[in-house]
Image: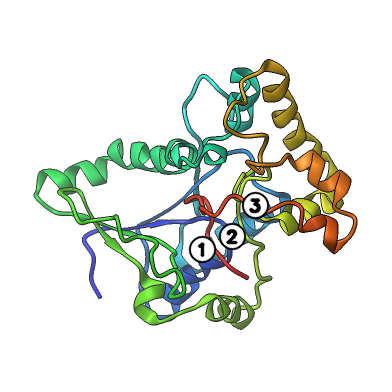
Amino acid sequence: MRFDFLACAVGGGRNMAYLLGLYEQGIRPDLMTFADTKGEKPGTYSAIERMSNWCQDHFGLPITVLTKNSMYDSLEDQSLRTKTLPSAAYGWRSCSDKWKIQPQDKHMNNLPTAQALWRNGKKITKALGYDAGETRRGESLKENDKYRFWFPLKEWGWYLEDCKAAFVRHGLPIPPKSACFYCPSSTKVEVIQLSQEHPDLFARAVAIERTAREAGTLQTVKGLGRHWTWEELVKNAATPDQLSMFPESVQMNCTCFDSEED
């Protein structure tokens, strides 16, 4: 398979396995980018560093880490300063658009190689790591004047288990599911795990809720769980019966997630 320019968007989770698959098929990316929201869990940052080193060894280039140029240092900073919750709590996707997609688009728009290709009427192939089990992801992405979109894992029929197997094949640890530690799309189990494994990050997520609640800006939702707060969940969910009191109210997966299911 030939590309004028192959740009790989890297989410940081298990679906990074498509980079391993590219290597196995003799395909070399021209660019790999990871947009850092500055809110990933430690395991994701470790996985990105390992994968970047692997890419340097096998492709001759590392993963380029990008951050959004903003008046806010991060989405967490924006939430605290504006006294609101991340947009996914309200059912919107703008947080991932602003902090994940826009930095990568801006980087590409300013890349001389990309500009030259576009001037000559050529297109960049943007590869995204949506696996074969994520049937609806990517449906809204249509080829345009700049990009054609490619979902290699779907094309190869790779499901999440196939992604995990690829990491094992190459002697790499399987990355954790990637998402901001305060993401409203987190499940109840993930919130409780965060409180147990990373109490410092959980406290920061609760601070986002408290700041918005105390400012009186929460009108349609109660907290990061939409109909409940993360603080209430961890405080009260000591038994399965108590846990059932908190419905999985956020059904939408934001585009930050690199794979949807375990």
Disc 1 residue type (three-letter)? Cys
Q: What SS does tag 1 mark?
A: helix
Viewer-closest of 148 and 6 = 148
Figure disc tally: 3
Q: Residue at x 62, y 18 (%)?
A: 81
Up the image or down, 49 lies above or below 85; here it is below
Whole-percent x, y for residue 118 in the image: 15, 46
- Which residue in the rendered view is the most extreme toward the right? 238
Disc 3 residue type (three-letter)? Ser
Badge 3: residue crowd in 10 Å (few <14, some 14–19, many ≥20): many
Up the image or down, 158 lies above or below 135; here it is below
Q: Report the residue marked by disc 3.
A: 186
Real-space CA distance between mark 3 and mark 1, rounded to the nearest whole angstrom: 29 Å
Q: What SS does tag 3 mark?
A: loop
Q: Report the residue marked by disc 2.
A: 53
Marks 1 and 2 close (CB-CB < 8 Å): yes
Q: What SS does tag 2 mark?
A: helix
Whole-percent x, y for residue 138 in the image: 35, 60
Badge 1: residue crowd in 10 Å (few <14, some 14–19, many ≥20): many
Real-space CA distance between mark 2 and mark 3, rounded to the nearest whole angstrom: 29 Å
Whole-percent x, y for residue 176 in the image: 67, 62
Q: Residue at x 48, y 32 (%)?
A: 68
The quadrant where residue 260 appears: bottom right
Instruction: Give the side of residue 128 with respect to residue 186, left or right.
Output: left
Q: Report the residue marked by disc 1.
A: 55
Real-space CA distance between mark 1 and mark 2, rounded to the nearest whole angstrom: 5 Å
What is the quadrant of the C terminus in the image?
bottom right
The quadrant where residue 38 appears: top right
